[in-house]
């Protein structure tokens, strides 16, 4: 059945089954990619995995090669406001028209696969990955930066046969129910993107049993492993954690240059890093006289990074917080609540996928440390948040806990803000 209207396509995609519950496999994705002729694309591919920093590192690498004169493709997830954000060429979002046209090509083959093998039902993320890779093929990009959705070994992006470089940004606890309950287990899943005799770059600070696990996988694949060195391309107006991501992106670009795979002057590498833009990562706006800072941290490692930025503020901010799992919320609130003036809970609408669940205020209250005084905690409905912020006496607010929440608040606030600071 052909679907030609953009909104109908969104409804179709958002109601696809997902691969959770131990049902991941690449067989159907490989078949889909092969029929679309995208499993071994003619363009160079940089494949990015990691617990945190994937999106920023991907955006930096895309910016590096765009400033270096290459035609670039970028696939990231999740999106903040529009699904089209996930697929970009030369820094521009895919148009609705191109998205519809490419979806129809992918959908026709996906439906044929399902008719042949009923259990081969293509998921939301598998559709998005196939659409992106096919679009990049048709538009003849030179290099595509591909961000893993979750994990690595069984992620849909890993159905690609060959890549130019595998990048692992960080390894920390997240999605343990899928990736494993120890850091080495999680590292092994992420290291699943390493290709035989390929190039591997790990983020600055990966060490101990995690780097040992990645080294083991790289050695078994005959791959060449490089660890990033700490650099500081950004000044104090940018979150310090972006220097870690920049170190990773710079190491990967320099390695690919030295190998002659993607030649680029060092000056263009630095220019691309400094000119990159990635929303929702310590991004500041002015709204009704208040500074509102959006940060997409959504797990323990991300909370520590946000905490370091909060402690550099002139005074403790008010925290607006939402999350989609109790475990994440407990860990993040234990880190952030002691250094914030007050906490307000709100619930994301999960526009990205309506079947997902966001914790409500009662559930979030239960995640608070027992030491937090009750009058320091409140809740506010998402639809009332603009008026609520106007009445607050505080001058600085930090919104974090979920990228979905960041997207919801951006839809409400950003188009009304007086100034985007970062």
Image (tube, grey):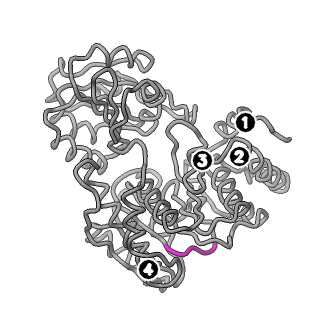
Determine if the magenta segment contains residue 163: yes
The residue that label 2 is drawn on is 99
Determine if the magenta segment contains residue 141: no
Q: Identify the mark nearer the N-term, 1 or 3.
A: 1
Residue beneath the point at 26% across and 47% down = 237
Residue 6 seen in render: yes
Identify the element where label 1 is drawn. Answer: helix
Q: CA distance from mark 3 to mark 2?
A: 10 Å
The residue that label 1 is drawn on is 6
Image coordinates of residue 365 in percent, x first then y, are 29, 25
Q: Which residues are magenta?
A: 161-165
- Quadrant position of residue 386: top left
- Which of the two marks, 1 or 3, is nearer to us in this view? 3
Residue beneath the point at 13% across and 36% down = 314
Residue in front for this viewpoint, 254 or 221: 254
Residue in front for this viewpoint, 367 or 385: 385
Q: CA distance from mark 4 to mark 1?
A: 42 Å
The residue that label 3 is drawn on is 93
Q: CA distance from mark 4 to mark 2?
A: 36 Å
Q: Are marks 4 and 3 in contact (CB under 8 Å)?
A: no
Q: Identify the mark nearer the N-term, 4 or 3.
A: 3
Identify the element where label 2 is drawn. Answer: helix
Structural crowding at the residue carrying mark 4, measured as other residues with C-alpha within 10 Å and reported as few (<14), some (14–19) or many (≥20):
many
Q: Are marks 2 and 1 in contact (CB under 8 Å)?
A: yes
The dot on residue 218 is 4
């Amino acid at each position: 059945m052909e679907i030609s209207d953009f909104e109908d396509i969104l409804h179709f995609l958002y109601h696809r089954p997902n691969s959770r519950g131990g049902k991941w496999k690449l067989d159907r994705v490989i078949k889909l990619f092969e029929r679309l002729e995208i499993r071994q694309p003619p363009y160079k591919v940089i494949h990015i995995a990691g617990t945190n920093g994937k999106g920023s590192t991907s955006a930096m690498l895309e910016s590096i090669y765009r400033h270096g004169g290459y035609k670039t493709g970028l696939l990231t997830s999740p999106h903040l406001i529009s699904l089209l954000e996930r697929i970009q060429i030369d820094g521009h979002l895919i148009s609705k028209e191109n998205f519809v046209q490419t979806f129809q090509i992918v959908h026709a083959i996906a439906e044929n696969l399902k008719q042949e093998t009923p259990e081969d039902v293509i998921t939301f993320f598998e559709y998005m990955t196939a659409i992106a890779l096919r679009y990049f093929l048709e538009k003849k990009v030179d290099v595509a930066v591909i961000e893993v959705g979750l994990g690595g070994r069984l992620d849909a992006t890993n159905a690609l046969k060959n890549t130019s470089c595998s990048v692992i940004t960080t390894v920390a606890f997240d999605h343990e129910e899928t990736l494993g309950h120890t850091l080495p287990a999680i590292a092994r899943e992420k290291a699943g993107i390493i290709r035989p005799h390929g190039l591997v770059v790990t983020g600055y600070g990966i060490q101990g049993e995690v780097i040992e696990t990645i080294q083991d996988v790289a050695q078994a694949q005959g791959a060449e492993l490089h660890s990033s060195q700490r650099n500081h391309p950004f000044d104090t107006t940018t979150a310090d954690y972006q220097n870690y991501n920049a170190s990773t992106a710079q190491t990967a670009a320099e390695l690919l240059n030295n190998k002659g795979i993607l030649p680029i002057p060092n000056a263009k590498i630095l220019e691309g890093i400094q000119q990159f833009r990635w929303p929702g990562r310590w991004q500041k706006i002015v709204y009704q006289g208040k500074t509102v800072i959006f940060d997409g941290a959504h797990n323990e490692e991300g909370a520590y990074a946000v905490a370091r930025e909060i402690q550099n503020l002139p005074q403790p901010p008010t925290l607006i917080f939402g999350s989609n799992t109790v475990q994440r919320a407990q860990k993040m609130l234990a880190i952030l609540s002691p250094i914030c003036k007050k906490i307000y809970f709100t619930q994301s609408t999960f526009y990205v996928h309506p079947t997902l669940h966001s914790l409500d205020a009662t559930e979030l209250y239960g995640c608070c440390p027992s030491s937090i005084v009750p009058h320091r905690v409140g809740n506010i409905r998402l639809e009332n948040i603009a008026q609520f912020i106007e009445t607050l006496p505080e001058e600085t607010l930090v919104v974090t806990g979920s990228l979905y929440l960041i997207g919801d608040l951006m839809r409400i606030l950003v188009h009304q803000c007086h100034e985007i600071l970062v």
